[in-house]
Image (tube, rainbow, N blue to C red):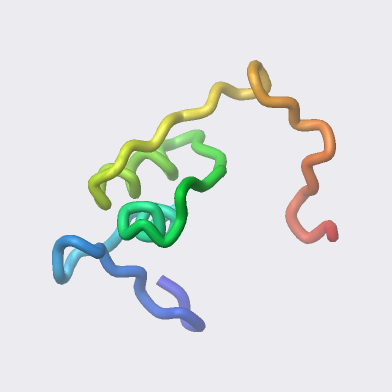
Amino acid sequence: NSNVYGLSKNPWKEGFGSGGSAGGDGIAISTRVAAFSVSSDSAGSVRIPACFCGIYGFKPTGNKRISLKGRLGVGIV
């Protein structure tokens, strides 16, 4: 829910939300607006919205397979 964009709604079930912090990604992928999305998931913030929107989300393994070199922190541009 955002004061700017409003509530992200579940694309398949009226009156339901899309899940956690990656809910917009879940909506975009399940409605075929986007092919895929890359995000972090430590407590289900990818997998839960994916489940709510009828798609699969995979929990990435921390620092084992994907290098974090070059990743920018929040607020650094």
Quarter of the image where one finds residue 70: top right
Q: Residue at x 40, y 38 (%)?
A: 44
Q: Residue at x 42, y 31 (%)?
A: 58
> Could you say where residue 60 lies in the image, as x and y percent from the top left?
52, 28
Q: Residue lying furthest bottom in this view?
A: 4
Q: Is residue 68 left or right of residue 1?
A: right
Q: Residue lying furthest left in this view?
A: 14
Q: Is residue 63 left or right of residue 51?
A: right
| Mark count | 0
Q: Is residue 2 above or below residue 32?
A: below
> Could you say where residue 18 lies in the image, as x and y percent from the top left?
30, 59
Quarter of the image where one finds residue 77: bottom right
> Could you say where residue 34 lies in the image, as x and y percent from the top left?
46, 56
> Could you say where residue 43 lies in the image, as x and y percent from the top left?
44, 36
Which is nearer the eye, 75 or 14?
14
Q: Is residue 1 above or below residue 41?
A: below
Which is nearer the eye, 2 or 50?
50
Q: Is residue 32 above or below residue 54?
A: below
Q: Residue at x 67, y 22 (%)?
A: 63
Q: Is residue 41 left or right of residue 18?
A: right
Q: Residue lying furthest top in this view?
A: 64
Is the N terminus in the top left, top right, bottom left or bottom right quadrant? bottom left
